[in-house]
Image (tube, helix red, strand yellow):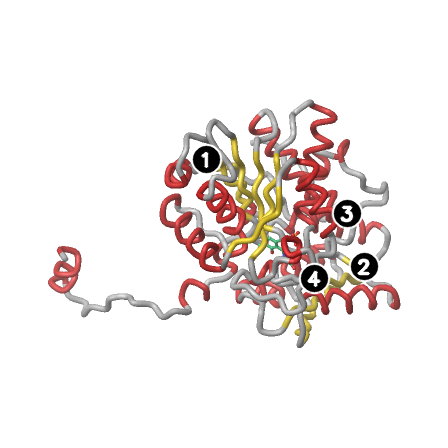
Amino acid sequence: MTPFTWLIDQYRHLLDLPPHTARVTLHEGHTPLIPVPNLAKTLGGDFQLWIKYEGLNPTGSFKDRGMTAAISEALGRGARSVICASTGNTAASAAAYAARAGMQAIVLVPQGKVAAGKLAGAIAYGAQVVQVDGSFDEALAMVVAMTEKHPLALVNSINPYRIEGQKTSAFEICDVLGAAPDWLCLPVGNAGNITAYWAGFKQYHAHHSSGLPQVLGVQAAGSAPLVLGHPVLHPETVATAIRIGQPARGEQALQAAQESGGRIIAVSDEQILAMQKQLAGCEGIWVEPASAAGLAGLAQQIETGQLDPSGQRIVAVCTGHGMKDPDIITQGGLSLKSIPAELGALDEIIIR
Ligand code: F0G
């Protein structure tokens, strides 16, 4: 058996973490890069497509990579409590790592707009969950103000150590492929992850001449401040994870897209849900709606001729597991067949 290596130790030479950083881990990272040839075929063109399946992290989302770093740093400098605003995944991740570290977690979430699996996670891990009658952006502003007044460690992606931890996914992709892919597609919400990937790829390239991907960042049309060029006061989308109108790292996201020769685009809720269904149905990979946005954006770009995938190596980051948001699948009502416990009745259904 290969001994366990903490993600942070594995890439320590590429991560800017202070010496006081402790070690709080749930064995995050090391997620699979899964080839999805069936999906690539339906998108058209002759190219290679992989999913970086971040939903397989310990709490079901990519946030765990950043959280192992942020909580370890906070614990190492003696912090007792952490706080964040969240559309759900950061909340669950912060709660889990804080529990592991013996710290208190306070998480602020927009009321009524958090998927069931995320809220349940945060509660199960013992966080103090506070619902805010407002948007994620308003909750984040409150959290920032609180950390200026009280000794609370902020673990949103404004925290630089979150970015350091999340860079490791770019390193893993390069390690597996032997180089950077031609394109990287991913959803964009508060814009921490796109910032982390771009920083990671640039750094890896500087050390290993791995090349650089073009970055396609994808927002939901009802929450697309980076596409519109101005904040969105009342963001809306079925992909509640990225229901954000004023991304904290918006400038850096635009810079990543521009520097890489990529772009930031928007897709509709219908496109997101259709891609979620398609990916689950043709590859057996069920991701939460926001996580299908990167792929939906890729599909849109190929369809409209704005991206020619021929001969390209493309990686789509699927940020969270489908089980985070079961309601999105069941909310329209289930049209399941019901039969008496008799073989004859089953026979009839199967034959039809
Ligand atoms: N995908 C999922 C599943 C997310 O939960 C998030 C962000 C993103 C994509 C976008 O990442 O914010 O770095 O651009 N979720 C945060 C949260 C906002 O609170 O869980 P980003």
Residue type indicated by callout 1: Pro
Camera-side residue: 121 or 159? 159
Q: Residues within 10 Å of mark 2 (few under 14, many from 20)?
A: many
Give whichever of discs 2 and 4 has the lower sequence position. 2
Q: Nearer the viewer, mark 3 or mark 4?
A: 4
Label 3 and label 2: CA atoms lie apart by: 12 Å
Would you say 246 lies left or right of 341 here? right
Q: Determine which of the numbered discs, if any, sits on residue 161 in the image.
A: 3
Label 3 and label 1: CA atoms lie apart by: 30 Å
Q: Residues within 10 Å of mark 3 (few under 14, many from 20)?
A: many
Q: Determine which of the numbered discs, if any, sits on residue 167 in the image.
A: none
Spot occupied by residue 88 in the image (x, y as percentages of width and height): 61, 62
Q: Residues within 10 Å of mark 1 (few under 14, many from 20)?
A: some
Residue type indicated by callout 4: Pro
**Quarter of the image holding residue 244?**
bottom right
Q: Nearer the viewer, mark 3 or mark 1?
A: 1
Which residue corresponds to mark 1? 35
Give whichever of discs 3 and 2 has the lower sequence position. 2
Label 2 and label 4: CA atoms lie apart by: 27 Å
At 72% from the left and 69% from the top, the residue drawn is 138
Give whichever of discs 3 and 4 has the lower sequence position. 3
Marks 2 and 4 close (CB-CB < 8 Å): no
At 67% from the left and 68% from the top, the residue drawn is 233
